[in-house]
Image (spheres, rainbow, N blue to C red):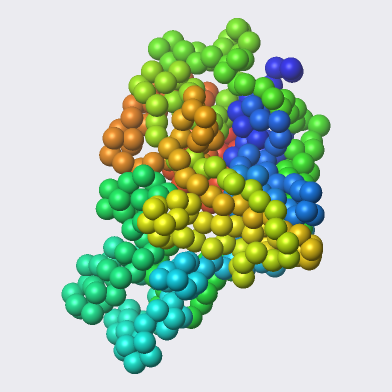
Amino acid sequence: MMKPDVLIVGAGFAGAVSARALAEAGKKVVILERRSHIGGNAYDYPDENGVMRHEYGPHIFHTSSEKAVKFLSRFTGWYDYEHRVLGCIEGQLVPIPFNLTSIEKLFPGEKADHLKEVLISAYGMGQKIPILELRKSEDPEIRELAEYIFEHVFKYYTMKQWGYTAEEIDPAVTGRVPVLVSYDDRYFQDSFQKMPDQGFTAMFEKMLDHEAIEVHLNTEAMDHLCVDPEAGRVLLDGEDYDGIVIFTGLADQLLNYVNGDLPYRSLEFDVQSAEGQYQPVTTVNYPTPAELHPYTRITEYKNMMKNPPKEKTTVAVEYPYAYSRNGEKGTVPYYPVFTDASRAMYAAYTAMLEKVPNIYLLGRLAEYKYYNMDQITDAALALAEKLTEEK
């Protein structure tokens, strides 16, 4: 391993984007990746059915960030794809996020028309309203509708996904899936909704193809990297390292879990082959009690493809788990769990790292915050620009 100007832990979006930007700024970069592949959780590949399978669950690129699109478009072409999700509610498949069409499907004609008029009058056509805001409305009809939506769309899905009730989780989590006062049945409303034409992995391969970037797969970073926050030192293979470290993994792991394990949610996938087409859209959510459906959603990957195979299909049934670094299931961390206790624990870890001037935490796991792919692209570019200016 060359002694780099920048050591990056993790070859997902955070690590790969920052690596390319810093390499182009004249830095020698080494990436340590514990998995056997690049791309992080966006890793995809063609499977035995000819389907582009997303190993860690569906990744849909959508953004209104021109900066992210400009950067990523250097490494991939795109094809149009607008994601649509249906939810299994009272035996019917209705649009998610819940919208005016959902009301028409679930309520009798006159009542549906009346409820639509009430929502449009109160909020205006085209608005996105968080469910918690609807539940606080002064209008009793809106509150009654909100309770119905909460019960059938948010309550059980949240309990299965997070292991908490919707009230116990940070409102930003439920706010990510609002109620739409419109007939727009797209899951996202961003101006740019496309998928990489050869897949995410091919995009990462081109991004990391640079003479100043060295990637080590199947490499556990903590076998090489040691952080001593009291002394403000970083050791790389036993020697003092004064270069830049960009860490995209678990913040608690970086400091040997001295304050305890940060809570994350994990996922497991029951991947199945089937004939023809399995369901009408890419993703069907099951916001039902766990006793009825223990899983949260089923994804049919070929429905995201530009030219999908006709004969066979691949579906993934998704089960949430609490993350456990030593367990039999739930061993891949996906989402930080936002509670007062977890935020306090994370703050204790970052306070320890303030004494180490050359370590930068980047990404969903390391920063303990939610990022979409476009958001982490922008954040990685911003960090690279900052580091280039400083050094």
Picture residue at 57% right of the left edge, 62% below the top:
283
Question: Which of the image's four quarters has the N terminus?
Answer: top right
Q: Quadrant of residue 104?
A: bottom left
Picture residue at 34% right of the left edge, 92% below the top:
110
x, y percentage for residue 159? 36, 50
Image vertical order of residue 107 relative to residue 277, above or below: below
Question: Which of the image's four quarters has the C terminus?
Answer: top right
Picture residue at 66% right of the left edge, 30% below the top:
35
State whether residue 363 appears in this view: yes
x, y percentage for residue 129? 36, 69
Q: Residue at the far bottom: name it.
A: 110
Image vertical order of residue 108 relative to residue 47, above or below: below
State whether residue 175 appears in this view: no
* Front in this rendered view, residue 120 or 291: 291
In this picture, residue 200 sits left or right of residue 252: right
Image vertical order of residue 354 relative to residue 385, above or below: above
Image vertical order of residue 45 relative to residue 133, above or below: above
Picture residue at 46% right of the left edge, 35% below the top:
323
x, y percentage for residue 379? 54, 45
Q: How many marks?
A: 0
Q: Quadrant of residue 307?
A: bottom right
* Front in this rendered view, residue 264 or 21: 264
In this picture, residue 11 sits left or right of residue 128: right
x, y percentage for residue 327? 49, 28
Q: Quadrant of residue 62?
A: bottom right
